[in-house]
Amino acid sequence: MSLPDPELQPEFYGDVPLKRALAWGIDVVVTLALTLAGLVLTLFVSVFFLPVLFGAVSIGYRTLMLARYGATLGMMVTALKWRGLDGRAPDPVTAFIYAAMHTGLWTVFPLQIASIVMILLTPYRQGLHDMVLGTTMLHRIAPD
């Protein structure tokens, strides 16, 4: 099984950058809600290491969703799926590395900008972490 070719079937990749941005926004809201739940569950003691809690929740949420469903909630809402360049769903270890790299890219802003530019310019719409891991996002079902 392989991915649709971006040259022959561009409908699978056409508006992926916009959908990725929307999915990211939804996933930030989910991560914030889970982080708030973590604050309450720790009786607000975790407020002293809030950035670490937010990062851990983000990595855990993304790893679980990507490993289990091949998409986060935001990706599901925007009809995206995450696949390896061979067309298969990546394994849980790759999901963890992807999630950690995604979170790490947001801490080094120039790398995040480079990743966004790559999503806009590469044929498979790959960000920096996608390029390193050999993964990409595409439409679950190609639009008509």
Image: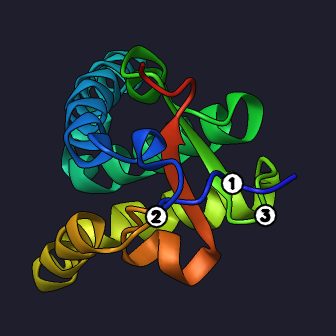
**In contact (CB < 8 Å): disc 1 and disc 3:** yes
User: Splitting the image into 4 quarters, where does residue 60 fall?
Assistant: top right
Q: Earlier in the sequence, mark 1 or mark 2?
A: 1
Q: Residue at x 23, y 54 (%)?
A: 51
Q: N-terminal of the two: label 1 or label 3? A: 1
Which amino acid type corresponds to the residue marked 3 in the rendered image? Answer: Asp
Task: Name the amino acid type tagged 2.
Answer: Tyr
Mark 1 = which residue? Answer: 3
How far apart in space, not on screen, are marks 1 and 3 (Cα)? 6 Å
**Considering only vertical position in the picture, is 100 above or below 42?**
below
Residue holding disc 3: 86
**Left or right of 86 in this view: 41:** left
To which residue does mark 2 refer?
124
Q: Is residue 133 left or right of residue 86?
A: left
Whole-angstrom CA distance, mark 2 to mark 3, is 12 Å
Instruction: Decide: few, some or many residues near mark 3? Use Cα within 10 Å; few <14, some 14-19, many ≥20.
Output: few
Residue at coordinates 26% horizontally, 52% vertically from top-left? Answer: 49
Lower position in the chain sequence, tag 2 or tag 3: 3
Residue 102 shown left or right of residue 28 in the figure:
right
- Of the 4 image quadrants, the one containing the C terminus is top left
Q: Which disc number belongs to residue 115?
A: none
Frontmost residue, 140 versus 67: 140
The amino acid marked with disc number 1 is: Leu
Q: Identify the element where label 2 is drawn.
A: loop
Q: Residues within 10 Å of mark 1 (few under 14, many from 20)?
A: some
Q: Secondary structure at mark 1?
A: loop
Say which quarter of the image contains residue 44.
Answer: top left
What colour scheme does the image use? rainbow
Circle 2 crowding by C-alpha within 10 Å: few under 14, some 14–19, many from 20: many
Q: Are marks 1 and 2 in contact (CB under 8 Å)?
A: yes
